[in-house]
Image (cartoon, helix red, strand yellow):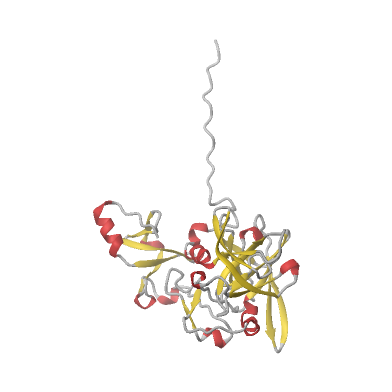
């Protein structure tokens, strides 16, 4: 992360100060380097600018280690998000991330072993969903048990009526349930990512999947996708990683031979450890086996800085403020 420091004192402080996350009221957070803590405010460097946060807006200050977290209000007043797969084979080995996500999403522990696609689909399938809008459909996946899920921006672009189809295995049978109270939390148009939240009153705790590390992938590694191509829900396609650095329109993508079709957009691309390594979002239609996915590192950056991409359902233009154009000076009327 590029640090912006002003003066020799701040430059020295940026080099030595630990990273921290400031949890704010309204279920928001900011991650960066603490420059100063005062009785009435906290000054934090978030990489491209320095923010001054009033103390009365702060719920909790978490340093780079959750164990060293310093509470600012009583713990009972702080909403805690927990995430975990329902299958113990994965959840016992997975741990909440100790980085910028601070438990909002999680990464699997290094001890997780590779498994077959057949076994992983049984474990991970319930965390993959279908996202429906009046204009079409796509896929998505839960990142924590509280109903927060990732999909593509282009799946929900311009839409306000969104429903999520969740598939769970109960008593050996697949149970489908549709949730219609879905709120857009954050959007990144240029990164083609969207964060949604299911807010139905009867919503249970959901199965979720851990985020992996695409940097650890090698060309030729086996990967697989789960999604709803052409509306065919719970479709699994397997392939290999063709390249890790395919540049398209100035962005780098993972290229895979796993079949990606319309409807797969927003779904997860997994490695054989059951970790999400990418978000499928497009294919080349004039060929076969030419699918692409957004690297998971872009997803983690989007989630860790979700406040910067916050979306207001009541004011879809909230990231932008259009000022009235300056009026031309009227000439005085001729006498």
Query: Within the image, what quadrant is residue 241 found in?
Result: bottom right
Q: Residue 280: x and y, percent? A: 62, 66
Observer-nearest of 85 and 204: 85
**Residue 39 shows up from this direction:** no
In the image, 335: left or right of 71?
right
Query: Within the image, what quadrant is residue 324 found in?
Result: top right
In the image, 307: left or right of 159?
left
In the image, 41: left or right of 8?
right
At a point 71% along the width and 88% down the height, the residue shown is 172
Quadrant of the frame with the C terminus: top right
Q: Residue 229: x and y, percent? A: 72, 68
Q: Residue 216: x and y, percent? A: 49, 72
Quadrant of the frame with the N terminus: bottom left
Identify the residue at the far bottom of this view: 171
Q: Residue 289: x and y, percent? A: 68, 66
At a point 62% along the width and 76% down the height, the residue shown is 127
Determine whether 18 is above or below 236 in the image: above
Identify the residue at the far top of this view: 335
Please give the count of numbered marks on the rendered protein: 0
**Residue 215 shows up from this direction:** yes
At a point 44% along the width and 72% down the height, the residue shown is 102
Observer-nearest of 39 and 35: 35
Identify the residue at the far front of this view: 220
């Amino acid at each position: 992360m590029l640090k912006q420091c002003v003066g020799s004192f701040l430059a020295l402080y940026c080099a030595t100060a630990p990273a921290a996350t400031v949890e704010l009221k309204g279920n928001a957070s900011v991650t960066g380097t603490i420059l100063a803590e005062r009785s009435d405010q906290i000054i934090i460097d978030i990489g491209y600018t320095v923010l001054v946060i009033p103390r009365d807006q702060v719920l909790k200050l978490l340093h780079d280690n959750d164990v060293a977290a310093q509470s600012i209000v009583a713990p009972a007043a702080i909403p805690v998000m927990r995430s975990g797969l329902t299958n113990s084979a994965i959840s016992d080995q997975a741990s909440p991330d100790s980085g910028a996500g601070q438990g909002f999403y999680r990464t699997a522990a290094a001890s997780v072993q590779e498994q077959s696609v057949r076994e992983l689909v049984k474990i991970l399938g319930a965390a993959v969903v279908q996202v429906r809008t009046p204009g079409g459909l796509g896929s998505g996946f839960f990142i924590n048990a509280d109903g927060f899920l990732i999909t593509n921006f282009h799946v929900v672009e311009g839409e306000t009526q969104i429903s999520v189809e969740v598939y769970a295995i109960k008593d050996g049978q697949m149970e489908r349930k549709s949730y219609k109270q879905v709120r857009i939390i954050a959007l990144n148009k240029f990164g083609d990512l969207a964060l949604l939240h299911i807010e139905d009153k009867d919503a249970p705790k959901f199965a979720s999947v851990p985020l992996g590390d695409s940097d650890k992938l090698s060309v030729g590694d086996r990967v697989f996708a789960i999604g709803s191509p052409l509306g065919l829900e719970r479709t699994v396609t397997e392939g290999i990683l063709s390249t890790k650095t395919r540049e398209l329109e100035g962005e780098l993508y993972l290229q895979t031979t796993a079949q990606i079709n319309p409807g797969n957009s927003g779904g997860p691309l997994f490695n054989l450890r059951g970790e999400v390594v990418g978000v499928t979002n497009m294919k080349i239609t004039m060929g076969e086996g030419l699918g692409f996915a957004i690297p998971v590192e872009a997803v983690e950056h989007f989630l860790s800085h979700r406040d910067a991409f916050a979306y207001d359902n009541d004011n879809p233009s909230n990231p932008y403020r259009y000022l009235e154009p300056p009026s031309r000076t009227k000439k005085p009327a001729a006498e």
